[in-house]
């Protein structure tokens, strides 16, 4: 037979349950307080760690900035030293180059001066030789001039070697001038007759009567003579209306054909 449950039994169970609930609530509160303390400790530790980290970062950044600044300063100093060294080397190189150029220029000037003296001596020697050869040609041609042109119908009767004039700033020299009362022949004598010699003589013929106005009414003819005549020059002189005189045996001769008609200036 079961024992009946009384009100005291029920109240005792309620009170026991209430006490268990209070103990559980107290335990829960204690554990929550402990958790709060731990969370506070964690927050303090986190804050401390963050502060330590920030200090380390700031210190590292400061160290890095100092290193960068030092590196920049070192680089700037190295660049300044390198530039200064380069400038010194360039200045030394330029000074050396200027000395060498001055020496080379001095050597060149000495060689040029020496060469100019040599050329001057050679020119004088050539001029003297050319003059002697020219005089030789004149002496070879002069005795035959009267006969040569008389045989061509120009009855010249006088010979004037090396005729000079200077009038109104116009200077002229004629190697041989053969004349009569109405006609004259200018003879240009060269050891080697060139194309330039013929052209210069043609210019001389064009200015002859200006230089010798007293021959203004004369028929003036031209002749070129040479011991040697460059190739084609005799034909060129022929086409210009000039007599061409060349050596023939012990004397000289006019080589123009009998049908040649001389030009008159």
Image (spheres, helix red, strand yellow):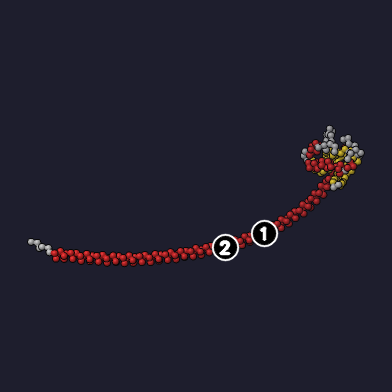
CB atoms at circles 1 and 2 under 8 Å apart? no
| Residue drawn at (38%, 65%) of the image | 47
For residue 80, the mark is 2
Taking 111 as reference, is 238 above or below it?
above
In which quadrant of the rendered image does the C terminus lie? top right
Q: Nearer the viewer, residue 135 or 93?
A: 93
Label 1 belongs to which residue? 98
- Is any part of residue 228 visible from this angle? no
Q: Position of residue 135 (x, y in %)?
A: 85, 46
For residue 122, the mark is none
Of tags 1 and 2, the one toward the viewer is 2
The residue carrying pointer 1 sits among few (fewer than 14), some (14 to 19) or many (20 or more) residues within 10 Å by Cα, namely few
Residue 162 figure quarter:
top right
Q: Position of residue 37 (x, y in %)?
A: 31, 67
- Is any part of residue 222 visible from this angle? yes
Q: Earlier in the sequence, mark 1 or mark 2?
A: 2
The residue carrying pointer 2 sits among few (fewer than 14), some (14 to 19) or many (20 or more) residues within 10 Å by Cα, namely few
| Residue drawn at (79%, 38%) of the image | 236
Residue lying farthest to the top in this orientation: 259
**229 to the left or right of 146:** left
Q: Secondary structure at mark 1?
A: helix
Residue lying farthest to the front in this orientation: 7
Distance from disc 1 to disc 2, alpha carbons, whole Å, reads 26 Å
| Residue drawn at (63%, 61%) of the image | 91
**230 to the left or right of 178:** left
């Amino acid at each position: 037979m079961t024992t009946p449950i009384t009100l005291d039994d029920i109240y005792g169970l309620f009170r026991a349950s209430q006490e268990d609930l209070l103990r559980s609530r107290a335990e829960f509160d204690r554990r929550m307080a402990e958790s709060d303390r731990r969370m506070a400790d964690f927050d303090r530790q986190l804050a401390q760690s963050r502060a330590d980290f920030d200090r380390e970062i700031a210190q590292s950044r400061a160290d890095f900035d100092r290193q960068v600044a030092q590196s920049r300063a070192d680089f700037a100093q190295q660049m300044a030293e390198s530039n200064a060294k380069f400038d010194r080397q360039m200045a030394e190189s330029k000074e050396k180059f200027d000395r060498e150029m001055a020496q080379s220029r001095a050597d060149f000037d000495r060689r040029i001066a020496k060469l100019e003296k040599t050329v001057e001596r050679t020119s004088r020697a050539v001029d003297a030789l050319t003059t002697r050869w020219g005089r030789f040609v004149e002496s070879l041609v002069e005795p035959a001039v009267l006969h040569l042109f008389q045989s061509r119908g120009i009855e010249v009767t006088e010979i004037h070697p090396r005729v000079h004039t200077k009038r109104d700033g116009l200077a002229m020299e004629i190697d041989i001038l053969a004349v009569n009362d109405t006609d004259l022949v200018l003879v240009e004598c060269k050891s080697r007759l060139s194309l330039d010699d013929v052209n210069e003589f043609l210019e001389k013929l064009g200015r002859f009567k200006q230089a010798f106005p007293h021959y203004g009414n004369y028929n003036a003819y031209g002749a070129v003579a040479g011991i040697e005549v460059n190739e084609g020059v005799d034909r060129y002189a022929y086409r210009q209306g000039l007599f061409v005189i060349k050596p023939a045996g012990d004397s000289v001769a006019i080589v123009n054909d009998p049908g040649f008609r001389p030009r008159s200036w």
